[in-house]
Amino acid sequence: MTIFERLYIAVFKEKARRSLFSKGLTRVSMPNLHPPSHPDAVHFKHFGLIGDIIYAVPAMKVLAGDKKIHLHLQINQKSLYKKSMKHANQGKILTEKSVEMIAPLLLAQPEFAVVDVLTDQPVDYDLDEFRNFPFDYNTNHICRWYFHMYGITADLGKPWLQVTPDLTFKNEIVIARSFRYRAPGIRYDFLKDYPNITFVGLKEEYEDMKKAIPGLKHRTVKDFLEFAQIIAGCKFFIGNQSFPFAVAEGLKVPRALELCFECPNVIPEGPNAYDFLYQPQFEKLVKQLDQLAK
């Protein structure tokens, strides 16, 4: 990028973004920061995406305090992705099947008491309200979107998910790579020189990755609790900005994130957490993580 291009972005693009942000603030209704409380539970509503729900867990824990979390998921909302991005659920953000898949993982967390489909339950915090705010959601950390909205914080360097690790994967490098949020120039073919690599994710994603890693194995799961147990038990995890990395980030397993330069809104935090944009650095990080596990 030339100095003139940088100046253009700094002067004109930033000025336009500031103007849009200021105008947006005049149109948004602020959330209720102190909703009426129920005796034993705090009720949350979310319509997804699945990864966004995982990144909302730290905020839910803070807002719930010592009360139980009741999470009500709104299903059948139109997908936020273009068809070319090959998102699951056939054009819907969440479906009833999505709720069935994620509920066992969330209910394994001691703070959660209910995870169900939204019907007419009470809602104390609508976690989708952040979408009304004029913030640039291609930046920052998804977890912090909720922090900004409710004036809270949490230590994101500590685990916010806990599961029993599946130690049959202790010698496996587990990877996932969606068709969305891929970094230009990143290749995975060098991983064919590493033994014991398992892919978790959609069949189409696996078949795409198998072209680069012929010996790649594919593991399907009955639900996302089993999925998380595999990631918790693995040697280390590699993924891009999608649901599997959200789980790895919540568990704080050794991990490497393929960062999308156009949308860097996932930030690995804590020990043995890396992100990469360039091929030599990617290969270096994998070597480091592999040596760490020995």
Image: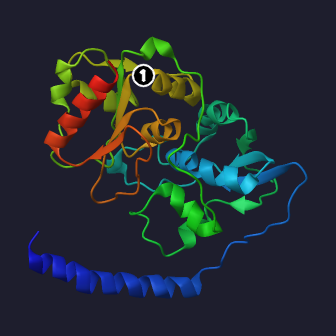
Q: Quadrant of the C terminus?
A: top left
Pick whichever, 182 or 232, lies toward us. 232
Front-most of residues 23 and 152: 152
The quarter of the image holding the N terminus is bottom left
Relative placement, left or right, of 107 versus 207 is right
Q: Position of residue 182 (x, y in %)?
A: 27, 47
The amino acid marked with disc number 1 is Cys
Q: Residue at x 71, y 57 (%)?
A: 63
Viewer-closest of 55 and 208: 55
**Count of residue discs:** 1
Residue farthest to the top, as pictured: 168
Residue at 54% over, 67% down? 131
> Are there few (<14), some (14-19), or many (20+) residues within 10 Å of tag 1?
many
Please indicate, yes or no, whether residue 174 appears anywhere in the rendered image: yes
Q: Position of residue 218 (x, y in %)?
A: 36, 19
Q: Quadrant of residue 209?
A: top left
Residue 232 vertical position relative to residue 273 in the rendered view, above or below: above
Q: Nearer the viewer, residue 158 or 91?
A: 158
Give the side of residue 81 with respect to residue 212, left or right: right
Instruction: Name above or below for residue 117 compared with residue 225.
Output: below
For image coordinates 34% across by 59% down, the residue present is 263
On the question of residue 212 being in view, the answer is: no
Q: Is residue 103 above or below residue 127?
A: above
Q: Give the percent coordinates (x, y) of residue 291.
A: 27, 24
| Residue 50 drawn at (x, y percent) | 53, 44
Q: What secondary structure is marked by label 1?
A: loop
Q: Quadrant of residue 87?
A: top left
Asked whether, in this view, residue 124 is left or right of residue 285, the answer is right
| Residue identified by numbered label 1 | 234
Chosen colour scheme: rainbow
At x 43%, y 47%, the residue is 269
